Image: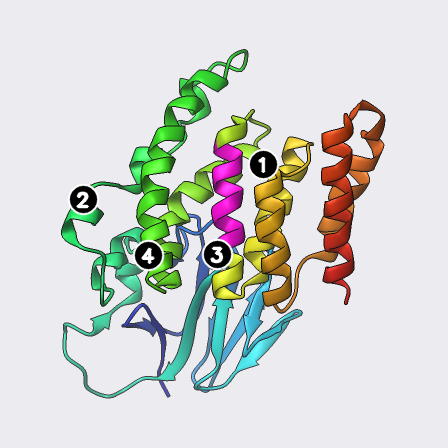
Amino acid sequence: MSFRLRYLQHDLELSEGQFAVGRNASCQLSLDDPLVSRRHALLTVGPSGVEIEDLQSRNGVLVNGARIVGAVALQVGDKIVIGSQEMTLVQGQARETSAQKVTSANLPRMTLSRMEAAMQQPLSPQEQSSVSFSSVSIPSSSGVTEADPEPSMLRRVDGFRVLGGVAEKALAMGRADEAERLLAGALTDVIEACRGGRRIPASLAEQAARFSAKLATTTGKGAWADYVIELYLGQGRPCPAAVIDELYSAFRKVSSVDVARLREYLDLLRENLPKFGPADRFLLQRLEGLERLAVR
C-alpha cells in the first residue's frame, strides 16, 4: 500500500523509509513557520503503515486534535498538525496527473513560502507585490555586531508594519489561514532572534506579539499564544497592555496553552517585581489573570 501526505492542495508521495518535517532545509518537508522546530517530527513509512514521532519539539504534534507522546501509528484520513500547519495522511493512488504529483525528491526545496502560489483565493497581485518575507528578515549574526544589535533590527520595524497591514486586511476578510502564512516568515525571524539572545526593539516585539495573539484568537491554535509568552519571557518584561488584551481573547478561544511556560514567565516577572513601577506591576496582575484562564 502506498501513502501520501496531503498538504496545501498537494499530495506528497511518501516512499518507504523516514520522512522528516521541520524548519531545517535538510528535512523532506521544510516549513517556514515559527511554531515548527528545526527537526519537529519524523514519519516512518513501511509497506503496510505509517508512524509519526514527535522529535521533542517545542509545540508538539497533534493527531486528530490530540498531542502525541512517542511514536504513534497513523490511519488513512488522520489529520496531523505540526506548528500551525495541517496535513492529512491519504492512501496513494495507482494513477495521477503529473501536475498533482510531488515526489519526496523535490521536497527539500518546497518550503512553505514557495508553495503559497498554489493556494486558492490569494490576496490581490498589488497586495502581494507590496510585501515579501525577505523584506522583514533579521540578518545573521555575521552582519551584526554584538555590541550594538539594535540599529539593524530597527530597520525591520517599518517592514513588519507594511507586512502586518496586509495581514490585517486578510484577517478582516476572515482569511486567518492566509494571514498566518503571510506572517510566518517574519514571526520566525523575531522568535529566532529572541532564542538567540538578541535584543529586539520594543516596537518590533509588540508587533510580533500582537499578530501572534490575533492568530491565536482567529485560528484557535494555542501555540500562537505560547509564542507571545515565549517572546516576552525572552525579553524579561511584561507584555504591553494591548497584547494582554488580545491574549485574554485568545485564551478564551484556544483549546490549550503551555501552562508551564506561562508560569515560568510569571515567576520571572515576580522576581523582578522590586524593579517595576506602578504600570508594570499592574501589567503583571493582568498577566496573572491569564494563568487562571489557562487552568480553568
Q: In the picture provided, is 187 more to the left or to the right than 164?
A: right
Q: CA distance from mark 4 to mark 2?
A: 15 Å
Amino acid tagged 1: Arg
- How far apart are labels 3 and 1 at the CA level? 21 Å
Circle 4 residue: 170
Quarter of the N terminus within the rendering: bottom left
Secondary structure under badge 3?
A: helix
The C terminus: image quadrant:
bottom right
Q: Earlier in the sequence, mark 3 or mark 2?
A: 2
- Residue closest to the eye, 46 or 257: 257
Task: Determine the secondary structure under disc 1.
Answer: helix
Which is closer to the viewer, label 4 or label 1? 4
**Residue assigned mark 1:** 195
CA distance for labels 2 and 1: 30 Å
Q: Specify which label sits upstream in the sequence, 4 or 1.
A: 4
**Residue 173, position in %: x, y?**
32, 62
Left/right of residue 33 with respect to residue 73 in the rendered view:
left
- Are there few (<14), some (14-19), or many (20+) residues within 10 Å of tag 3? many
According to the picture, the residue beneath numbered tag 3 turns out to be 215
**Picture coordinates of residue 70 (x, y %)?**
65, 69
Q: Position of residue 92 (x, y in %)?
A: 31, 84
Discs 3/1, front: 3
Image: 35 above or below 147: below
